[in-house]
Image (cartoon, helix red, strand yellow):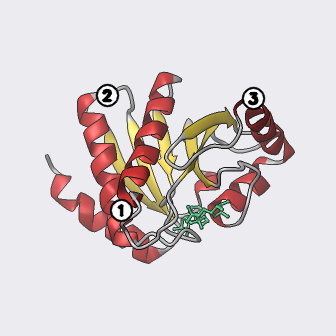
Amino acid sequence: MKPQIEVIHGDITTQHVDVIVNAANPSLMGGGGVDGAIHRAAGPQLSEACKMVRQQQGECPPGHAVITIAGNLPAKAVIHTVGPIWQGGEQHEARILEDAYRNCLRLAADNGYKTMAFPAISTGVYGYPKQAAAEIAVQTVSTFLTRYNPLERVCFVCFDEETADIYRRLLEPQRGE
Ligand code: AR6
């Protein structure tokens, strides 16, 4: 069966998927944006789990990803990744963003999860241009699903309509294939 890629305009914390991705910072200790929303919705168990990861492996560098329990969220697990901070495009931001998406996909697949949801990593506080970030997201997910296919559904959960439109346009040519 061909895996589905979906665009959802909404809040990632309410998604009924196996695993949601958090756009975290290297400390894994929470923050604003989607990170803050996920920590609030998941409750203190998530902070405890992140603290344990921190103690065991230190900070999570940009492009890397770690997995924890999901506390009170409908999802079964949370994958925390750290995207690049946009600095104009000459500081390997594209490669780091691609690594972030790919490492999340690998972690989800390696843990046997079938459905997952991504936010638009790095496009908020970290300032990555939305269109360029979405192109990397769609390309990396599509390539992963083509080459290695344990996932059944990947959702791009967009908090604003502008981002959702960007993703819909990028995915349009793939519809009906
Ligand atoms: N559901 C889905 N997407 C959301 C939600 C939500 N509930 N809330 C915000 N977004 P950002 P970053 C979107 O800033 O740029 C944190 O403080 C948002 O509109 O959350 O990777 C971390 O601790 C945007 O499109 O993450 C880091 O310090 C996207 O999620 C830093 O921000 C990403 O915006 C990470 O910055």
Secondary element under disc 1, as helix, strand or loop, is helix
Q: Residue placed at 36% from the left, 66% from the top?
A: 90
- The residue at which mark 1 appears reads as 134
| Nearer to me, 58 or 65 | 58
Discs 1/3, front: 3
**Amino acid beneath label 3:** Gln
The answer to whether any part of residue 161 appears in the image is: yes
Q: Earlier in the sequence, mark 1 or mark 3?
A: 3
Residue extending farthest to the front is 91
Q: Work out whether 83 lies above or below 146.
A: below
Among the 4 quarters of the image, the one containing residue 152: top left
**Residue 162, image quadrant:** bottom left
Task: Measure how far apart labels 1 and 3 are at the Cα level.
Answer: 32 Å
Q: Which of marks 2 and 1 is in front?
A: 1
Residue 172 lies, in percent from the top left, at 21, 61
Q: In this view, does 7 lie to the left or right of 146?
A: right
Q: Which amino acid does label 1 sit on?
A: Ala
> Where is mark 2, residue-wise?
149
Give the residue pinned by disc 3. Answer: 56
Q: Callout 3: 10 Å neighbours few (<14), some, many (20+)?
A: few
Residue 155 spot, x, y in % from top left: 43, 49
SS state under label 3: helix
